[in-house]
Image (cartoon, rainbow, N blue to C red):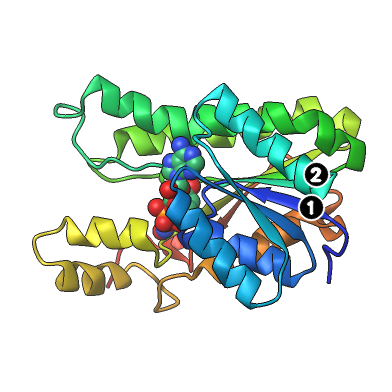
Amino acid sequence: MRYTGRVAAVTGAGSGIGRGIAEFLAEEGAFVLLNDVRAEAADSSKKILTEKGFRSEIAVSDISTREGAEFMVNEALRHGERLDLLVNCAARQIIKPVEDLEVEEWDTVLNVNLKGAFLCSKAAFPFLAQQRGAIVNICSVHAQATVGGFASYAASKAGIVALTRAMAIEFAPKGVRVNAVSPGTIDTPLVQAYFDSCPDPVRARSEFLKFHPLGRFGTPRDIAEMVAFLGSQQAGFITGTEIVVDGGMTALLFAQ
Ligand SMILES: NC(=O)c1ccc[n+]([C@@H]2O[C@H](COP(=O)([O-])OP(=O)(O)OC[C@H]3O[C@@H](n4cnc5c(N)ncnc54)[C@H](O)[C@@H]3O)[C@@H](O)[C@H]2O)c1
């Protein structure tokens, strides 16, 4: 129980990876603040945690706005009275070639994925400093290599990797560590939406599996394990780094 007596705030905790991270941190003893812009999604995550006997509260807000980010941090403090770990997980993905991508769509993706991580980290930093706490940013393998249609998403994720390094350096004197986790393909509604956009979703799924040397997609728990480690004292000398959790996908030159 690495998080007993500690408080964690997770953005985008109403679904997929964010929900999995929240659940695992709670299992490890944390009080978890569940943020999501969709109230019903945050509610259903809270219901899952409550049924398992874990303590959590929700903060429904849009973290791409300054008010939404500050509200999320203030709710964590109001309910938990301290803040030890911030997990920036909320994201949007709009899959379109640059030629068709509207400026507003670019802004939406960059505002949630990159500006949101900046705003939440900025709001949380003074309180994390009181606990010598940590930030974990959920990035993506798209930060390193990508495919057509992902320009805004890939740019936002590469931005968070750079932001991770920059904040790690600035926050280090106060003992706050900042790291990034870049998932490969994790089976969540986000990935299912991608498969659903393909002409044959079932075939797309099995074709995609060929790019995963471990022979499976990841689970939210695979990512949660790394987040919990990076947020803990076991990772006390790790800051400013990006750890890829992708089942070997980015090690593969081509599928045989
Ligand atoms: N699933 C994957 O394969 C995969 C791979 C690499 C990286 N990631 C990253 O992992 C994270 C979680 O992805 P997921 O697959 O669980 O996605 P998801 O779509 O299932 O969950 C994302 C959550 O973020 C919330 N959200 C969106 N905009 C928000 C805002 N403005 N304010 C607050 N909440 C907001 C959504 O409502 C949703 O509940 C994202 O950062 C994503 O980029 C996912």
Does the numbered disc 2 mark a residue whose Cβ is under 8 Å from ligand 1?
A: no
Local packing at callout 2 (Cα closer than 10 Å; few below 14, some 14-19, many 20+) is many
The x and y percentages for residue 167 are: 71, 29
Q: Given the current orientation, which residue lies at the most extreme left position? A: 199
Query: Does the CB distance between marks 1 and 2 fall below 8 Å?
Result: yes
Camera-side residue: 12 or 58?
Answer: 58
- Whole-Å distance between the Cαs marked 1 and 2? 5 Å
166 relative position to 218: left or right? right
Quadrant of the frame with the C terminus: bottom left
Is residue 99 visible to us here? Answer: yes
Question: Could you tell which of marks 1 and 2 lies nearer the N-terminus?
Answer: 1
Three-letter residue code for mark 1: Val
Residue 145 position within the rendered picture, expressed as x and y whole percent measured from the top left:
39, 44
Query: Residue 82 has which mark?
Result: none
In the drawing, does residue 226 fall left or right of residue 148? Answer: right
> Residue 106 appears in which quarter of the rendering?
top left
Mark seen at residue 83? 2
Q: Residue at x 78, y 41 (%)?
A: 77
Residue 91 visible in image: no
Residue 64 at x, y = what percent? 49, 29
Q: In the image shown, does 49 or 252 lie closer to the viewer?
A: 49
Which residue is at 83% across, 72% downward? Answer: 1
- 57 or 251: which is nearer to us? 57
Q: Residue at the location (27% across, 67% down)?
A: 208
Question: Where does label 1 land, which residue?
Answer: 7
Mark 2 is on which residue type? Leu
For the image shown, how many numbered marks are present on the structure? 2
